[in-house]
Image (tube, rainbow, N blue to C red):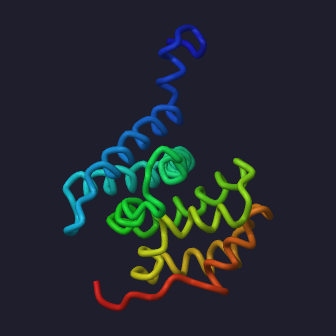
Amino acid sequence: LSPGSHGCAAALHPAALARTVAAQLCDAARHSCAPTGHDTAVTVAAAALARACRRGAADAVADALLDAVTDSSTDVARPDWANELIDAVPDAHAVAKLARAWLVRCAARRSTWRASERAFRAAFSVRFGRCASTRHAVCDGMLLRRPQPRAVLPALIRVALVDPPRVIINR
């Protein structure tokens, strides 16, 4: 199908398809998180999200995950499922790409830096505490080496330097 010839052609665009699949994976992870450790759905969703981020769909995954985390229809104050999902991602480089795309998507939505910080902590604080590669990617890579949108710089500085999530030694 040529672009614009049919309504389904827009849904099959790679970015739209990746966002839809990521939203479905986030929804499955959110509804299957058990309080007793990792669930199979969380593990599968984390592996699929890592593969999507590695293959260039980090923006779509970040957009879908940001929608799921900031969804006001859930009745939880802090969605622990997002921390569990990001912590289950087996690839540290995919998490770094997702974190970069997350902040860019927050800036594109014109979120305040406080809302961006809360959303970032809701999804990345456990991984930040457990994984040295993620800490390095956020602190060194995102803060010093790559330009970030100005709107989210205060959030990034607070997460990386002022009040970082505590480091967890044992897994």
Is 52 located above or below residue 8 in the figure? below
| Residue sitting farthest toward the top | 5
Number of numbered discs on residues:
0
Residue positioned 49% across, 12% down in the render: 1
On-image quarter of the C terminus: bottom left
| Residue sitting farthest toward the right | 150
Residue positioned 63% across, 68% down in the render: 117
Question: Is residue 56 in view?
Answer: no
Residue 37, image x, y percentages: 21, 68
Query: Which quadrant holds residue 90?
Result: bottom left
Q: Nearer the viewer, residue 76 or 52?
A: 76
Query: Which quadrant holds residue 139?
Result: bottom right
Residue positioned 46% across, 32% down in the render: 17
Left or right of 44, for residue 165: right
Residue 100, image x, y percentages: 60, 62
Q: Nearer the viewer, residue 95 or 23?
A: 23
Q: Nearer the viewer, residue 87 or 96?
A: 87
Left or right of 28, for residue 151: right
Residue positioned 74% across, 70% down in the render: 153
| Residue sitting farthest toward the bottom | 169
Residue 19, image x, y percentages: 49, 39
Question: Is residue 99 in view?
Answer: yes
Residue 12, image x, y percentages: 47, 24
Is 133 located above or below residue 116 in the figure? below
Query: Which quadrant holds residue 102?
Result: bottom right
Q: Nearer the viewer, residue 77 or 159?
A: 77
Is 137 located above or below residue 42 in the figure? below
Is 83 located above or below residue 68 in the figure? below
